[in-house]
Amino acid sequence: MKLALLVNKVKITQAVGRVEFKNISNITIDSREVSPDSLFVAMSGFKVDGHKFINEAITRGACAVVMEKADAIPDQIFSHTDCVKLVVPDSRVALAEISNAFYDEPSKKLKLTGVTGTKGKTTITFFLKNVLENVNIKTGLIGTIANYFGSETVQSKLTTPQSNEINMMLREMVNRQTEHCVMEVSSHAAFLHRVDHLDFDFGVFSNITSDHMDFHKSFDHYLNSKKIFFDLVKPDAVIIYNIDDKHWPALLKDADAKKISFGFDNKADFKISDVEYTLEGTTFKVTYKNETYNFNTKLVGEVNAYNATAAFAVAVLAGVKINLAVLGINSTPQVPGRFEVLSKGNKKVIVDYSHTTDSLQQALKAIHHIVKDERPVYTVFGCGGDRDKTKRPLMGKVAGSLSTKAFVTSDNPRTEDPFEIIKEITAGMRSYNYEVIENREEAIKTAIENAEDNAVILIAGKGHENYQEIHGVRKYFSDKKTAEKYLA
């Protein structure tokens, strides 16, 4: 694509070079990915400043560089190398604008559903993908566990990728005749302009509790970052929101789209009732337009009645026949690492992604609801390094108060000392029903092998993840595989 066409889509404060003679073959923010005719976008990151890699990008053949620091590289270097310099007010905003234009506005060429909230994003997208595919609607998915192009799976690094990657994936989906894409929208993505200019047909709000305080610093900032997404949703789209969450009015107050609610509240458009669940699954009812529908899903817990209903609402409003939408919900397979139950005889292990105070509390409460204090409950958990430290003692308090015994271990310590993280966790534990075993495999092994035959063991924090990051290095580790090993 001609660079001049892209430049017309972006607010440029300074241009140096022969813009009209350049053709762009790809867009990247990583100088290592630059090839001849690349457009390199230099962003001021939180750990690494992309402006430091402009020289490398030029050396590798970039024909243009977008930057927000006008004096990062002398103009003479651009003139000497015949590379175009484009200065913009905000590189992240420009990346979204340029990517949308370069890939020919792919989000307008399929139905796009964005799902945001503290909990449930992944499960809602899996429910919805299954419903749509069961009625032969070719569906893509962009999310935490992986990105899906129909039957093809591509591993993901971020819940919501950068805007150039999103638009590239959407363009690939369009090329493959994909009709609908469902994607998770994180608070980081909304705040950092990754979903700017995307044409959402549906926006879903699951719930909101405190999370990512290492980034947002306050709950208000976190909530307002979520709000950015709903402000972006176009007026002729539909927002499906959890009416039982008290924060929905603040989130949606400026949203122009049509609003449809779900939840237990009697005013809900999709009203949930009669939820019952065991370790085998969940049954519940949903009433919509005075008709009641029965659901029976393999996924466990009241939270999955919410998740399933949100997906059901999108499907119905997207035109799926109601009876087929019910069948699609009921046939959705287990979502990896989301309250995933493993068994050996009567002993149960639950692998769950719960890594916040609220999600850990909800998981343990769900287990107690099922076992009714008739079985011991053990918890293996830790907290990630280089992330929100405020939740560590709070998660310790929850695990200690709701477990027969807790095993405090490492999660992803990243660059932090794992024992310092554990010390901060145990500072919140008011009782002494816990044991510190820093090695995660050893903690899982001890919990499983020493537990009674009727015990329920929650392994919390990592869920679907198949790695552990220690001292900045990722090594293979799977809670599920480790649990299966010692159950056997």
Image: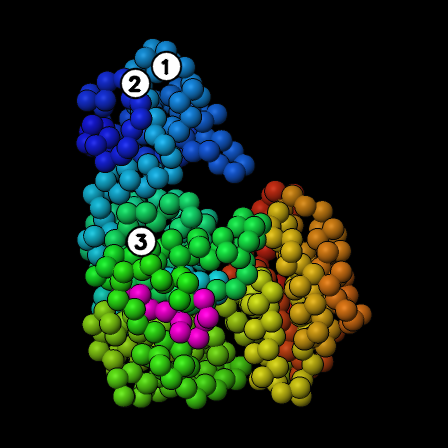
- The three-letter code of the residue at mark 3 reads Leu
- Give the Cα separation between the discs numbered 2 and 1: 7 Å
From which residue to which does the magenta span run? 238-247
Task: Residue 178: tell me if it is visible.
Answer: no
Q: Is residue 9 magenta?
A: no
Q: Residue at x 22, y 74 (%)?
A: 320
Q: Which mark is residue 263?
A: none
Q: Which mark is residue 232?
A: 3
In the figure, is residue 108 to the left or right of 268?
A: left
- The three-letter code of the residue at mark 1 reads Asp
* Direction right: furthest residue: 432
Q: Residue at x 61, y 85 (%)?
A: 371
Mark 3 or 2: the one toward you: 3
Give the labeled residue for mark 2. 16
- Return the x and y of residue 156 as percentages of the image width and height: 43, 51
Mark closest to the chain's N terminus, 3 or 2: 2
Q: Nearer the viewer, residue 461 or 475?
A: 461
Element class at badge 2: strand
Tally of numbered discs: 3
- Return the x and y of residue 462 as percentages of the image width and height: 57, 60
Mark closest to the chain's N terminus, 3 or 1: 1
Element class at badge 1: helix
Q: Which mark is residue 75?
A: 1
Query: Which of the 4 quarters of the picture holds residue 284?
Result: bottom left
Q: Residue at x 33, y 36 (%)?
A: 94
- The three-letter code of the residue at mark 2 reads Val
- 3 and 1 marks in contact (CB < 8 Å): no
- Return the x and y of residue 363 as percentages of the image width and height: 57, 73
